[in-house]
Structure formats: C-alpha cells, structure tokens
Image (spheres, rainbow, N blue to C red):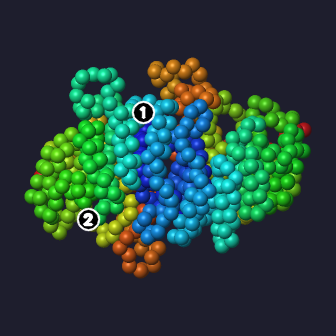
Amino acid sequence: MPSALSISSHVVHGYVGNRAMVFPLQYAGWDVDALNTTNYSNHPGYGKFKGTKTTPDQISDLIEGLEAILNVKSDYELIITGYTPSEDALKVIFDRVSSNIYSSSSSSSSSSSSLPSSSVPLWILDPVLGDNGKLYVSEGLIPIYETILKSGYVTLITPNQFEFETLVGVKIDSSLESLKSALEKFHDKFPKIPNLVISSVSIGDKMYSVGYNKGKAFYIEVEEIDCSFSGCGDLFTALISIEIFNDNPSHELTPKVLGNVLVKLNKILQHTFESEKVKMKGAPFTNVKDLSLISSRHVLTDRTSHEHEVEYL
Amino acid sequence: MSKSLLSIQSHVVHGYVGGKAAIFPLQCQGWEVDGINTVNFSNHTGYGSFKGTSLKKQEIEDIFEGISNIGVEYNAIISGYVPNEELIASIAAYVKFMKSSSSLLYLLDPVMGDQGYLYVDKTCISQYKKLLSTKIVDIITPNQFELELLCEKKVQTVDDLKWCVNHIHKTYGVKYVVVSSLTDLEGLQSDYIYCATSTASYDNSINLFKIPIIKSYFTGVGDLFSALLLDKVYSNLQSNSYREGDKGLLVHSVNQVLTIMTKTLKLTHSLGLKAFNNDKASRSSSKVGKINDGDSMKYFELKIIQSREFFSYEGKGEYFPLELDSILQ
C-alpha cells in the first residue's frame, strides 16, 4: 500500500486543504499522514472563521517526531505540500524536507541538485498563493516557492493560472501563442521541474487544462461549470497525485493522466453543483462553499481510462 | 440522505488512533465528518517518542464559536481522547447547547486509560462525571478501567458490573451502555475479551459477547469501535428496524461492530506480520506490537485504509450475545 505525507491546511468544517486531499487519497487506497498547517473552524470563503495557524516551530517538531519513528526517505512514496500560511512555515517545511528526504546521505561531491533517485518519494507541490488576480498569502512566500522550484526536488507542480503567472512572471493573454511562450519562460526559469499542470486556462472563449512534461506541452478542453468551488484546486492536486501512480510506472504527467483526472473532477463538481441546487431551492448561486466529496466518493475508485481529445503545443 | 457528525478527538500525523481511526470509516459510510483535533501529535504515544501539542481551552472555544457562527448542525457528535478537564468542560457546554435545539445522538467515549493505567489528567474523572450529570450522553463506551473510574468502584464480580452499569443508567440517564472490553472478571475465562451491553429500562439484563484475543498490541481499537458503533446504532434506527430504546438495537449493533472489528484486526495482524517479515532492514526482534518499541509498532498500526470494505457490513453479526446470568451457571 502506498503512503503519502500531505502537508496542508486543516478546517474543522468543509473540504479545503488537507480536508479535500486526505479523503480522496485514502479512498483510493493510500495511507496518508496528514500534517496540518492550520487549525481553522472553516475556510475564509464563509466570510468569517476562527482558529490558529500551526506555528513554524510546531511544524518543525511534528516532522522531527516523524523522523524519529519512520524512515522518511523510504516510508513515503509521495510528499504533497499545499496551503502554507506563512513564510517561516514554508521555510521550515522546505528545510526539513530537503535536508531529510532529498539530500544525499553520503557526503558525495556529486551535484546535490540532481533529480531525486527513484527510491525517494515524489514531491508534488501546489504553490498556493491566490486566485483570480488576488494573493491570499503574504507576498514573501513567492521567492521561497521560487527557491523550492529551483531545488530539483519537486516532480510536479499544480498552480492555477494566477499562481503560474506570478511565479513565472508572465501573463497568459488568452491566446495559444502567449501560453506557449509562457511555458517556454517557465522552462527557462525552472528547468528542473519535469511536470506541470495548470488546471484551467482560458484560451479564446474556451477553458483548457494544460499539462507539461519534460518540454512537451498539451492541453485538453474542460467542461465549464458556471460556478466556483472552494477546495477545487486541492481536490485537483489530490486527484493528480492518485492518477500519476495509477498504472503509470514512470509517474510522468501524460495526457492520459490529466484526462482521467479531468473526468473525475468534472463528475465530482457536477454532483456538487446539483446538490447545491437542491440545497438552494432554486435561488441563484455562483460559489459552492463545500464540495460534495463524501457523496461522490464512488468516483474516486473508478479506474477506467477515458479517451480525450488532446492537442499539443 | 446526508448525515453529518462532529468528531472531537486526537489527531496524529502518522498512524491510526483517535480521529485517524474513526473519521475515515465514518466517511466511507457516507457521514460528512467535521473534525476537531484535541491534540496534534506526530504519532501515538505507544512508539515511545512523539512530538506535538494539545489544544488550549481558548482554542477549542474559538473553534466552537467559529462553527456556530456559520450555523453548522449535526446528526451526531462523538468525543474521544481529550487530554484535560478544561477541554472536557468546553465540550460539555457545546454539546449541551447543540442538544437543546436538535435530536442529535451523542456518543461519549470517556477515554482515560486502560488496565489500571491512567493516561489523562486525574481531574478528567470528575469532569466526565460532571458532563454525564447534565444527562446529554446517549451512548457511552468505557472499558473496564474507565467504568471503574466513573463509578468509583472496582469491577471484580458480575454483581460489581451490574451495579456499575445500572449506576450509569440511573444516575446519568444514559440509554446505551457498552463496556467495550472486560478482561478481568471473576468467573469468566481469561483467554477472551468480553464486551458487555446494556440498554436502559431493561434492569440488570446485560448481554455479553465473548471475543477471542489476538495476541498483539493494537492501538486505536477503542476509537474505531466507538465510531462504528455510532454508525450502526444510527443507521439501524434510521432503517426503522428498531425503535429507540429497544434492547435488540444495541445487541444487534454491537454484534455488527464486533464482526467488523474482528475482520479489521485479523487483517491488521496478518498484513503487519507480512510487512515485518519482509522488511529485512528491521532490527527489532519482537514479532508482535509491543509498547515503546517503535520499530515493531509501526507494522501493527490498524489497517484502516485496507479494511474499507468491511465497514459497510450489514449482516446479523458473527457473535452470539449471551445473557450475563446464564454464562456463569
């Protein structure tokens, strides 16, 4: 059975951060160690919430506690990092993860920044910064994420369009050409990241999910639902994590992986949307606060592969 | 129909105790589970080392305020490991408030210790009694030691057991009492663990389940037990097979839960042994989980994820409920 360490936020109520990632992974058969970067009553999308951030010292202690009882290099197949509320917290996570999981144990003179060997866990990182042109964490996190992305330890990142633009320092202006040049700039700036997914990018009047694997880029049209869903990005990262290990020994981001994820995501979002309609009794809404994750759980174990129309850039 | 539940218990990053043992099984059974983590530890204390912190009184009150502010409601609440009396008092106040406006089912697992060993502050005992005296508890699942603490009485004989269970019903108005594990009672065979059930208004009629012991040290068993019990009692009531307060409801539910537990523990034991034997790097010589031995402990964490398909068991149960009085003849 595969094991993952998932580092993200905790909310008592609702499905964002670890609450949107842990259950899908578990239901798909993963043992998930959940390290919570916050302890909030609910997500801020409700307009009000209570609770605390996990302090950098607490995060450091928890990882130290794990190191004492586990072999963190070999006991995990996967490290997932998501919402991290402060610069110090992100620094601590990076320091701990890089020194204890990805640094070579021998004091060899070979390049310390070479790609991790197959015996260490894959690191999938969701650089949670904000959405729709707005940062919801401190600006100071951006350079730390850049450092992490340049470390060579991260296998896959799952930014949204805004996060991608922020990290790369470009704008995608709704054309294929600008997407292409943005991806080239991404590769120039972060040459050690082999895989990238941007869950949705608008090109013309359509939405596409964009995948990138070792210099090759592709995009798949996504069905648009006229509504936003809190926790959708976290769920997407979890689904990608599941699928990249699903009958895919190379763990590369392929069009098949992305296509299968999009089918599952769409089913869960559609189900959530329909549930919300019933709940709202006809009243209009543009945002759903809580994904209907539990009642669409059967989707998570679906292992059928779907054919998709894939375009290459 | 969707059903929602608030789980108030410990969180460990690695392993399956507290919320980690309870929440996933409930989610698999369709529960929308909200989770308050009373502690946030790297792992359970059985490893001999752990890191982490406990929730402070102000923090839990803030959380209660936060979820109240957004109007969350629950069909059930379950509370487990709570490390100190202040937190117990806050939980009591919140549950009482929630019960005043709804018919939610509250299961209290008064986690305090096991086999004569107390692992919470001593002051928790009187605070749990205080909580119980507000008569908000529907189901209680102490082990033998916890029952003794709550009743201030050693449970050595069948009469002691009857007295204590009756005391919980009468003094605290608890409808369903399940003593999750009895290991030391005069007249009972010692190679078994016993589970006792009693429903209010069926005076002195206690049913006993006799469970063969698997020789290994498992953790989180009580937490999984309570979660499954809440699910079964709730769904057996919903399906109208029983009415509230029926004696058969608790006996049937516990039988189902024990059946699931047995499957889960057997799987845990066999997968644990297999992993242990395969892992040549292991330097531990112990073949069963042993307290304070981190090397073997990690192999015998409950296989909660791998047991997923067991949780939906809806059969009659594979155990035979015995009348306490008849078993001793």
Q: What percent of the width, then of the height, locates residue A189?
A: 17, 46
Q: Is residue B119 left or right of residue B61?
A: right
Residues marked 2 and 1, same chain? yes
The residue that mark 2 highlights is A133
Q: Which mark is residue A8?
A: none
Q: What percent of the width, then of the height, locates residue B21?
A: 57, 45
User: Do we see residue B163 in this rendering?
Assistant: yes
Inter-mark Cα distance, 2 to 1: 37 Å
Q: Indicate the secondary structure of the residue bearing disc 1.
A: loop
Q: Quadrant of the C terminus of chain B?
A: top right
Residue at x-position 73% and y-position 63%: B136
Q: Which mark is residue A72?
A: 1
- Name the amino acid type tagged 1: Val
Q: Quadrant of the N terminus of chain B?
A: bottom right
Q: What percent of the width, then of the height, locates residue A22?
A: 44, 49
Please identify the quarter of the rendering in which residue A229 is found.
bottom left
Q: Indicate the secondary structure of the residue bearing disc 2.
A: loop
The tag earlier along the polypeptide, 2 or 1, is 1
Q: Is residue B103 left or right of residue B11?
A: right
